[in-house]
Amino acid sequence: MTTDDPFDTAADGPHPDDHDLLARLSAADPAASLPPAAPAEVTRLAEDAMNQPLDTPDVTEPTPLEPRRSRPLLWIAVAAAAAVAVFGGFLALRPTDRGDDPVAAGGPTVSHLQVAPVVGRCAPVTAETLGQQDVAFDGVVTSLADGVATLEVSHWYRGAPTDVVKVGAPGLDQRQLLDVVAFEVGDRYLVAGHDGAVVPCGASGAYTDQLAGLYSQAFGG
Amino acid sequence: MVTEDRALRFEAVVRAVIDPLRRFLARRTDAATAEDVLADTLLVIWRRLDDVPAEPLPWSFAVARNVLANAERSERRRQRLAAKLESQPAAAADWPSDGGDLALPAALASLRPQDAELLRLWAWEQLSPAEMAVALHTTPNAVSIRLHRAKAALREALRKTDDPAGHEGSEGRTR
């Protein structure tokens, strides 16, 4: 699909065996004999999609989230990524298996997100800022203990899917965890992460249709 | 709500991406899942039409990867909950069985999933590092480094799994 030289990909130039490797992979392409879609089929697929409701708001008009009223307002100079970077050495560790094998091997797969302290001011959460995060999922808290909230994930918007995500760290002051996201067992949450840490300031929070709409805009369902 | 202009733009994007997407899915899952994931991917493209970049394909691959990952995850959970059977790996695409390169699927399967995916995007989707970066939500530089390592890992795996009797090169099949 590209005119770029497919061999010109190695950081230090093409390996002499790249052509052989490419030829061998190409020869084993499972889609090599797949015929093009018939024009009528293309039309049907396009129409099927267009017949679905456009139930997400216009991305050019992001809706700021209402601030949480039940908790002290914590404002952060968003770019949550920047906050995470500042405190990266303090608490934010990379998840142990993010990006690793999501294929089931007999039990639920688990990934981890850390929490960074919330300071500064929050900017409104928009689909644009959400879209810059590298992890996003929808899940229910199944346990909350010892500074760790365990969520069973029902949907991954972005990131290597695992069945379970553990947020926080054993021994972490639970108030610090709950200041970032007010987790409660049994409740459903939308959680965004960047560089191994939860994105705070309303970007992660209890499931609402409004927040879900922003996640859909940002990550495409 | 749905303007004719929007519909025309969508149809143009669909025509540009549909066959690459069908091949992309045929390489990664079974036919029934591929059909479902294709429909859901097109729906995401329709709903996010204003976000579709000028070069829609790498972006569409990113959407399809996400939809497929969720579909396979749901299927694995269903399998676990249904009968506590031994978990099955996600349904693999149909590999050529007509006397083709039997060592290659085994070698590819032995790699870390993210390495195998890079190699697929490189060899089968024929993406440039910049395009792979869009598909994988990373940077071209990271792609180049990881791809370099993935190729080395595949070479090593092939060295271990190659049938000593042969299969050292392609069987002459080309796309």
Image (spheres, coloured by chain):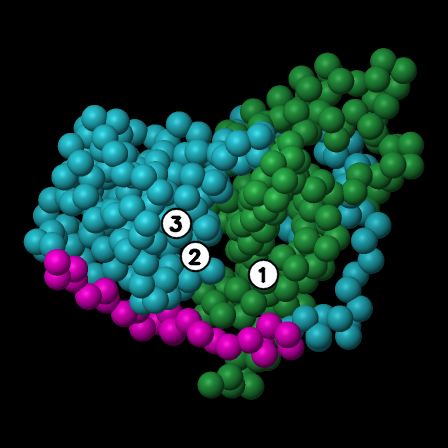
**Residue B41, labelled with which disc?**
1
Judging from the image, mark 3 belongs to the subunit labelled: A
The answer to whether residue A104 is visible is yes
Q: Which residues are magenta?
A: A47-70
Vertical order, B8 against B98 (above or below): below
For marks 1 and 3, give the CA distance. Answer: 22 Å
Q: Residues within 10 Å of mark 2 (few under 14, many from 20)?
A: many
Residue B46 percent location from the top left of the image: 54, 70
**Residue A147, labelled with which disc?**
none
Report which residue position mark 3 lands on: A139
Judged from the image, the secondary structure of the residue bearing numbered disc 1 is helix
Report which residue position mark 2 lands on: A219
Front in this rendered view, residue A19 or B41: B41
Front in this rendered view, residue A153 or A135: A153
- Tell whether A32 sits left or right of B109: right
For marks 2 and 1, give the CA distance. Answer: 12 Å
Q: Residues within 10 Å of mark 3 (few under 14, many from 20)?
A: many
Q: Residues within 10 Å of mark 1 (few under 14, many from 20)?
A: many
Q: Colour of chain B?
A: green
